Amino acid sequence: MKEVYEFIKNAGTYFLATMEGDQPRVRGMMLFKADKDGIIFHTASTKDVYKQLQKNPKAELCFNA
């Protein structure tokens, strides 16, 4: 897992996919932290991504180096 965390940290940015109704939404995000506790990012509660995750917490992340 250490290698996975290092890969994620080195990528720095990633893409987060959520759903809004029946439409997918994908946006670039910046990583805050990745370790044994999970992948942590932050966003404002006024943003669409926050509202989408509140309605449906299922999401996908895509990291690339």
Image (cartoon, helix red, strand yellow):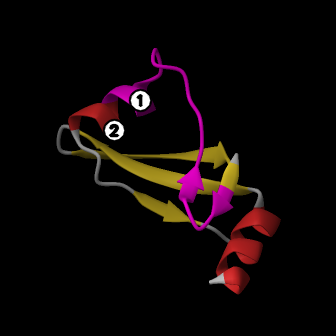
Q: Nearer the viewer, residue 65 or 58?
A: 58
For mark 1, does the 10 Å Cα neighbourhood hold few (<14), some (14 to 19), or many (20 or more) residues?
Answer: some
Q: Nearer the viewer, residue 18 or 22?
A: 18
Q: Position of residue 30 (x, y in %)?
A: 70, 45
Quadrant showing the C terminus = bottom right
Q: Is 46 positioned to the left or the right of 57 in the image?
A: right
Task: Give the structural element (helix, strand or loop) at label 1.
Answer: helix
Tell me the crowding category of disc 2: few under 14, some 14 to 19, or many 20 or more residues within 10 angstroms, Cα based: some
Q: Amino acid at mark 1?
A: Tyr
Report the amino acid beneath label 2: Leu
Measured from the top left, where is residue 40 in percent x and y?
58, 49
Q: Are marks 1 and 2 in contact (CB under 8 Å)?
A: yes
Q: Start and end of the magenta stretch?
A: 34-51
Q: In the image, 19: left or right of 9?
A: left
Q: Is residue 4 magenta?
A: no
Residue that extends furthest to the right in the rendered view of this protein: 10
Q: Which residue is mark 1?
A: 50
Residue occupied by mark 2:
53
Q: Is residue 33 left or right of residue 48?
A: right
Q: Which residue is depicted at the point 69% across and 52% down?
A: 33
Of residue 18 and residue 4, the one placed in the foreground of this image is 4
The quadrant in which the N terminus is found is bottom right
Q: Mark 2: which secondary structure? A: helix
**On the image, which quarter does residue 23 sit in?**
top left
